[in-house]
Amino acid sequence: MMRLAITEQWTFKRKNQLLPDHRLQIPGLSGKFESLRRLEPGEAEKTLGVMLAPLEDQKAHVTHLKGIAKRWAEQVASGHLHKYDVIPLIKSTVMKSLEYPMTLLTLEAATWVDIMSPVLQVCLPKAGICRSFPCDMVFAPLKFQGLGIPHPFGSQVSKHIETLLRHSTNKTKTGAYLEAALQEHQLETGTSFGIFQQDYCNTAVLASDTWIKRVWKELENMDIYVAFDSPALPLRCVGDALLVEVFMDLEVNQDDLKWLNSCRMFLQACTVSDIVTADGRCIRQSAWCGERDGIHRSPYQWPRTVRPNRNHWRLWQDTLTRALLQSDDPSHHLRQPLGTWFDSIDD
């Protein structure tokens, strides 16, 4: 057992250096030593009323929400309610509990219906309504002859839009994190537009699986448009172009586009000018072979990437040849040399 006082420092040890019954303890709020639990990155833990895990665990969220709905339904089932009080009770109690973590969640509409099932199975008969009443009518507004129970999926989408707009407008810390994530996605996809202005089916394969990406898919499926003014990836000279857009103009398939983007990310290049010589006439040998060099220095903070394999670099070379080069030119001359540079020589 290892106990760590507040005045001591952490030290690094490998797992094979520890005893089988090793436990790490720190002083708790009461002053007594408490053991720290070790969780895997994908293992969720309830924190501040929501299930959190570094690698996200949607199943844990669903299980937690189903538990809330089931426990509430069991309590209501054993009580007596006037039928006119049932629907207001759902709106003012269990729906509020389910709405609390919605900002973090990106669940499908069918999943939310499944979560609500125990509540509806108990409450609809108590309200004098058939238990098998269609869900479309259960969640429809009163003016359309529905029951007026808000659909949890609709509430989730509203929470997402509110989060995007409110925090960005009010310049909160969350808004700063969202802006950083949006810019990171734009760098990752390598296009001239922000991620919410892109077509999901075209560039989603280039983006990491994040909350932003899942909300992007959700909004596009519902034909909802949200615009953000993010800095565009700049072109650096006359005739310059973004590499991803060059590849997309060739109509490469999604798998090839993904690996071409991996090569681009490894080289930390956004535009054609990032991989050419200073005179704008040839592709640098290092960029052609997939080697980083000290000539090109990017102003961005790039994510860590693994170097693609030989087959992917062959795809990279073939695609650059089709898009930019004179055929079978060993010097890799561009068909259309780049023009005057916009950058100052002092930059």
Image (cartoon, helix red, strand yellow):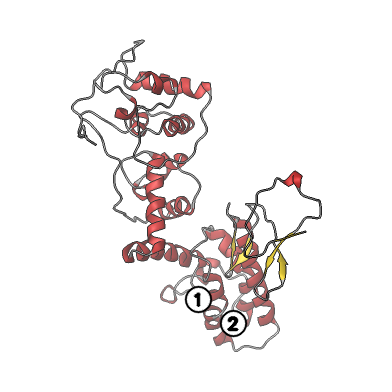
Q: In the rendered structure, which amino acid carries the disc numbered 1?
A: Leu
Q: Can residue 217 be seen in the rendering of this structure? A: yes
The answer to whether residue 319 of the structure is visible from this angle is no
Looking at the rendered image, the quarter that the C terminus falls into is top left
Residue 13 circle label? none
Quarter assignment of residue 325: top left
In percent of width and height, residue 264 lies at 41, 31
Q: Percent position (x, y) of residue 138?
A: 53, 71
Q: Secondary structure at mark 1?
A: loop
Label 2 Cα crowd, 10 Å radius (few <14 / some 14-19 / many 20+): some
Q: In front: 16, or 85?
A: 16
Disc 2 marks a residue whose amino acid type is Ala
Q: Position of residue 97 (x, y in %)?
A: 56, 74
Q: Residues within 10 Å of mark 1 (few under 14, many from 20)?
A: some
Check disc 1 and report the residue beneath it: 147
Q: Earlier in the sequence, mark 1 or mark 2?
A: 2
Tag on residue 127? Answer: 2
Based on the displayed image, in which of its 4 quarters is residue 236 positioned? top left
- Residue placed most toward the observer, 66 or 234: 234
Q: Is residue 111 above or below residue 335?
A: below
- Residue with the most extreme front position: 7
In the rendered view, tell whether residue 219 sits above or below residue 341: below
- Is the N terminus in the top left, top right, bottom left or bottom right quadrant? bottom right
In this image, 28 relative to 177: left or right? right
Q: Are marks 1 and 2 in contact (CB under 8 Å)?
A: yes
Q: Is residue 282 above or below residue 89?
A: above
State left or right for residue 57 relative to residue 1. left
How many numbered discs, if any? 2
- Nearer-the-camera pick, 1 or 306: 1
